[in-house]
Amino acid sequence: MPETVLQLKNANIYQAENLVLSDVNVELQKGDFVYLIGKTGSGKSSFMKTLYGDLELTEGEGHIVDFNLLGLKEKDIPFLRRKLGIVFQDFKLLPDRTINGNLEFVLKATGWKDKTEINERLIKVLDKVGMGNKGFKFPHELSGGEQQRVAIARALLNEPELILADEPTGNLDPQTSIEVMEVLQDINKNGNTILMATHDYALLLKYPSKTFKCDENKVFEVVQRKS
């Protein structure tokens, strides 16, 4: 039986009072790699924010990694986010501490206490994204692509059931974007489920996968033409 990691049924997504997406029906199974595409302003970010509890779901059904998004309580949001890995376009690394310090901060904030376990986990996730020897550096000493790899490593720290990548290559040049995509592809092959919002259509052609599109207040599956 495939395991459902995310399911939205007849969901309406609002930004303040404005209906951004209506009657959304989306399902992700464990191990999927799914794209969410659409023009700027089409609702991709609102969709993602609803999934990690930044926007409240008030109409329809929504289940994500065993949490019910409808009526999700404020106090449950940190627990939901522990089961998700979130990768942002602008990396969101803390500039005043090293890469190891950044990752350690997240682990401590999510309840890790044992110094040895913390160090082992840092080494493991940095190795996974090819940054094993860069832990002592500060974010400003890294290229954009390296910072995004660290952001992906950070998303992996608590072994998330679902990774939400919101325009992870948005600030990167084409070659670096491909390197970051290779990292995401490897992680997906290791069994991590990934939902990636992007407007980089070159990546979709290079790495075809299941795709949903936001357009005119709707979300629908797009079938990629085989070239």
Image: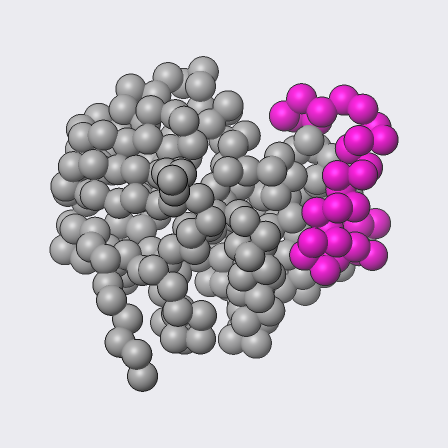
Question: Residue 47's image quarter?
Answer: top left
Q: Position of residue 70 (x, y in %)?
A: 27, 24
In depth, the one of 115 and 49 nearer the eye is: 115
> Residue at left 40%, top 18%?
74
In this picture, is 133 found above or below 178?
A: above
Q: Position of residue 64 (x, y in %)?
A: 38, 33
Question: Residue 186's image quarter?
Answer: bottom right
> Residue at left 80%, top 39%?
120
In depth, the one of 202 and 101 nearer the eye is: 202
> Residue at left 74%, top 35%?
104
Q: Position of residue 17 (x, y in %)?
A: 17, 33
In this picture, is 156 found above or below 146?
A: above
In this picture, is 113 found above or below 170?
A: above
Residue range corresponding to the magenta coloring: 108-136
Q: Position of residue 97 (x, y in %)?
A: 75, 42
| Quarter of the C terminus within the rendering | bottom left
> Residue at left 31%, top 60%?
211
The number of numbered discs placed on residues in the rendered structure image is: 0
| Quarter of the N terminus within the rendering | top left
> Coloured how?
one colour
Residue 132 visible somewhere in the drawing: yes
Question: Does residue 109 belong to the magenta stretch?
Answer: yes
